[in-house]
Amino acid sequence: MAAILSREAIAVMKSKSETSSRKPISQKALAEYLKLSPSTVSLVMNDAPRAQLIPEATRRRILDAAAEFDYRPDFYARYLYSKRSYTVAVVLPSVGEQWAAAILAGVDRKLNEAGYLYFTANHHGDTKLIHDLPRRLLERAVEGFLFINTDVDSNVGKPAMMIGSQASGDGTPRLALNNRRGGELAFEHLYELGHRKIAVVKGHPWRNAAMDRFEGIQNAASRLGAKIRPELVRELRSGNSPQEPTAHEEGYACAKSLIDSGESFTALICFNDSTALGAMRAFQEQGRKIPDDISIVGFDDVESAAYVMPSLSTLRQPFMEMGEAAAAGLLDLIEGREAPPADRRLDPVLIQRESTRAPKR
């Protein structure tokens, strides 16, 4: 007995020879037209793993017909059937920072390879937003979360990974830079060049990364028989508010404060590159040449660090690698594979450029 076609399937067959535009058709009508089951069409169109078991000729026939009749899988129908959205959320302070863009590039690469999409949500340090965003994103059927430099106060109810030095009190796996090692590398580099009077601009007191980097500097100094003098230490104070000074402005102010103190020093370690660039401007305004009179080390290796005059010696963070590794760990959690390590640290790399040299004798 011949199969009874639906009106829509008959309309598809009649419109095959038409050249005018047609409305997208349903999966059921496409399956009837191809004389295949809807589940077979669904497997191929959604690129499901089991689609590999379907003969290549059949898969090609489905894809060609879908293109011809402008068929696209219905996302909501697929979600209701499978409870899978293949979408995750990335929550971070701001995508405007260079380091954030580099991490997102790694996240993007890994998620695209796996066929996932993602939302990005900026909270700008707003504690209410940090609290509300997970709930709002769950309403959009995300399957997991990547939190970048973001403290989350409770379990979000879905698989999650953290990137950064924030605490992970609920056992969420975390991927972070080894900031202590970064502080050690910065001090060791200057010490090996012959510097003994080394000043430091610490990061904000509320940042774990700032505490870790300064601890690394102190550890290296102690191990090498040197000392960080308190009168040669300054600390960044601004928060995330747009009305507060930028890192460039604070770096400039800290360097001016060190100059005005009258204390003698031949090198400066800055919390990040933006702070270092601000400090360089202050020294140059005072007629101090870099690196002849003062050597400066930054942290992050932002794009501009290689192009300022002189180019900035700094600690390069493997941002893209961090993004890829965190996204891979989140996908392992979502797909039920082996869980990533609870706390993985990646070491920074010292990039020596023109802003550091041996001190004058």
Image (spheres, rainbow, N blue to C red):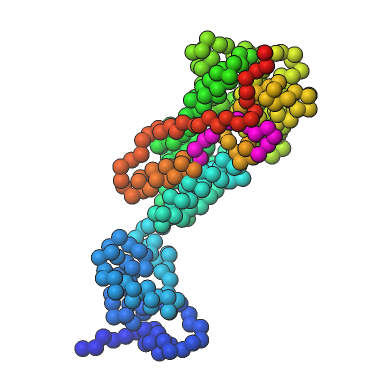
Q: Is residue 46 left or right of residue 354?
A: left
Residue beneath the point at 54% across and 44% down: 102
Q: Nearer the viewer, residue 124 or 344?
A: 344
Q: Residue at x 51, y 13 (%)?
A: 224
Identified at 35% across, 46% down, the residue is 332
Q: Is residue 41 visible?
A: yes
In this view, the residue in front, 273 or 116, is: 273
As drawn, 28 above or below 241: below
Q: How many discs appear? A: 0
Q: Nearer the viewer, residue 330 or 74?
A: 330
Q: Quadrant of the N terminus?
A: bottom left
**Place of residue 342 in the rendered image (x, y in percent of width and height, measured from the top left):** 37, 34
Nearest the viewer among 149 and 322 is 322
Can residue 272 be seen here? The reply is no
Left or right: 168 as drawn, with respect to 193: left
Residue 4 position within the rendered picture, expressed as x and y whole percent measured from the top left: 28, 86
**Within the magenta stretch, is there residue 65?**
no
Region rendered in magenta: 307-319
Residue 254 on image: x %, y %: 70, 24
What is the quadrant of the C terminus in the image? top right
Magenta-drawn stretch contains 318:
yes
Identify the residue at horizontal 24%, vertical 88% (top origin). 2
Describe residue 101's horizontal placement relative to residue 142 as left or right. right
Residue 348 location (% of width, % of height) = 49, 32
